[in-house]
Image (tube, grey):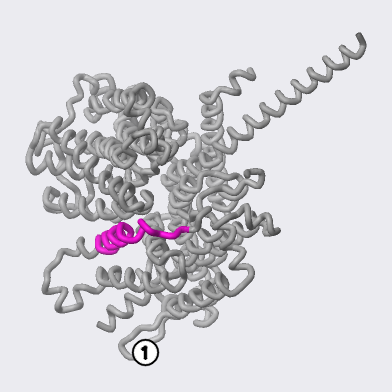
Amino acid sequence: MVLLLQYTLIFASVLLLVALGGCFSEHSGVINLGLEGIMVMGSLGGALVMRFFPDLPPVLMVLAVLMGAIIFGMAYSCLLGVACINFKADQTIVGTAMNMLATAAATVFVKAMNTAANPNDVSASIQYINPKKSFLVRIGGFEFNWFMLVAVIGLVVAYVVLYKTKFGLRLMACGEHPQAADSVGINVYKMRWAGVLISGVYGGLGGICYIMVSASEWKFDAGVYGFGFLALAVMIFGQWKPTRIALTALLFGLFRALASVYSGIDFLARLNIPSTVYNMLPYIISLVVLALTSRNSRAPKAEGIPYDKGQR
Amino acid sequence: MKKLLKSDGFQTLIASLLCVIVGLFLGFVVLLFINPSGAASSIIEVIKNFMHFSVGKLRIKNLGNTLVKTSPLLMCSLSVLFAYKVGLFNIGAAGQYVVGSAVSLYAALAWHLNWALCVLLAFVAGAVYAAIVGLLKAYCNVNEVISGIMLNWIALYGANTVLTGVKEPTSPYTLHLVGHAESSLIPSLGLDKLFSNNTYVTIAVPLSVLIAVLILVLLNKTKLGYELKATGNNKNAAKYAGMAEKRNIILTLMISGALAALGGAFLYLTDYEQWSCSQSSVPGMGFNGIAAAFLGGLNPIGAVLSSYFIQHITNGGAYVDLTKYSSQISDLISSIIIYLCGFVFFLKYAINSHLMKSEEKRAQQALKAAAEKGGKE
């Protein structure tokens, strides 16, 4: 049971971080379907830090890995910003392209790096068994992961920034009615850029968190298994509100955790349900949840529509 | 020249070519960055694909292999394109393709059905599977991209489970159709002879091109196509004009899903590939279909060309210098191309506004000249 709690919390942390990223971007008016790609890039950034500096002391290691993920995620989100804000490209196409591009680029890059180090190594994976230990703290049977704290801080920051600061309120205005925001002197383009970049930060953090809790070695040709999209489902179910997103993330995290630990829980193991069902579960639940909640969903009004200053 | 520049088709062609050139160039830059010594020859190998071989027979045979995989890609790109014309982004094509593959393979290997029946079953299964997305979109307002992605993963896990029943005892791969279900192989009707006995080249290849033409006709020459496009342009206007907009959304996705599923049947019923029951990511065919659809300017005939091109460079990726680079460089190039396709609308807009400005200028100059002339007289 402790194991289930631990996995629930950690997967919820991933979903929470990424969903908050989507939340910032969408409140500014840009649909970020590229979150999956941003996660891949963020995880690559963090993994590279662990590969090249495996001997950092624990505290520094945690900080350095987080920084790596943030920088990569943020840099990658610029692709979305340039295309969708400055060039008014179709946000769906660009997001999809970013997801494909991230996996392909990470694969090519990691393979090239591995082959350069050892000509016989053609895998696309980075291993981080030892650095991973810096993130874990044992409390009895419970394995605390620093990412849980990161997620909580991320939640508090998101809540305060969005609702209690001038910046956050302005950001949300750009997603609701950019023309009105512009008329009172807010630079819509800048605000949208801010939204996209912040989503890059959160997405990158979510990405590194995801690969580190899932394995001790990540194959970058596999992407992040649709987690970016699960996070979008969490965001929609959470009605674009940070606190509700957090609760939803816990629920989804529970279902994802079941897939990892069901064989260890007597009652579930006895049911003898094939593992495929557990693997499908998070996706099925999210479909059901979306079906129930999307009808009355209150998305930012202007999301997905490129802002054109000259438009009336 | 001006007239030519103004025509939408020409602009699309220019934009697509530009995307291809820039995509290849960026791919080249990536290769240079990884290892400068073999970059030029490797990118040329990607472009050459089957021309890599020096013997004519081998070239023709490998051209055949590229064509075998072009037909499912074309089906997926038609699927994406058809839905997009109706204002829906069917990223679920990847999952519908998986469903089509799984159903056709299972029908072939477990029930030994005739190939036409297997194809038909895949068609129906794809339509039904995509109908879920349609129903959710029409009645529950669920974003089709997110539900599509969820269904992609569900399809993958489902396919792996179902096909485990017909796999080789010692490997994760499904049984070969040759030797187990000969009647389920799509016939080649002599096409294999054309490609120096490449038995994988079947009527699926011409069939997929034929379907592209059918889609073109359906979209542009029929009442149904008109209604669907109207629904895509403005759901509410279509509703007020008396069209069943909910039915249209569901119908569109069903057709779209059926097309993608056909793609799966067209590949796996040739026995060119075996399904790996342990694969952990959704096959890229459906996603490449998105690339092909946009690169082809969202036109079925354009999709034929662009699908071939995407498959051409994907197959070509196998011939890069594998001691230095990986074959995924082709995936990288195609994903860069899709990203660039996002800019196509902007490019067209820029061309058009430039044309309009210069026209306006000319008109003003003409007016001025006329006024001056009038003043003199």
- Which residue is depicted at the point 16% across and 74% down? A268
Residue B38 seen by the camera:
no
Residue at image coords 27%, 44% = B130
Q: Whole-percent x and y of residue B173?
A: 19, 49
* Residue B25 drawn in magenta: no
Can you give x and y, in whole percent of width and height, for residue A107 in the image? 43, 54
In which quadrant of the rendered view does residue A311 lie? Answer: top right
Given residues A222 and A174, the one toward you in this image is A174
**Type of secondary structure dominating the magenta stretch:** helix
Front residue of this view, candidates A180 and B150: A180
From which residue to which does the magenta span run? A280-299
| Number of residues whose C-alpha sits closer than 10 Å to that of mark 1, classed few (under 14), some (14–19) or many (20 or more) | few
> Is B233 above or below relative to B355?
below
Q: Which residue is mark 1?
A: A139
Q: Is residue B289 visible?
A: yes
As drawn, the residue found furthest toward the left would be B111
A255 to the left or right of A189 = left
- Quarter of the image with the C terminus of chain B is top right
Name the residue type under label 1: Ile
Q: Quadrant of the N terminus of chain B?
A: top right
The answer for which chain carries disc 1 is: A
- Residue nearest the viewer, comparing A49 with A184: A184
Residue A284 on the magenta segment: yes
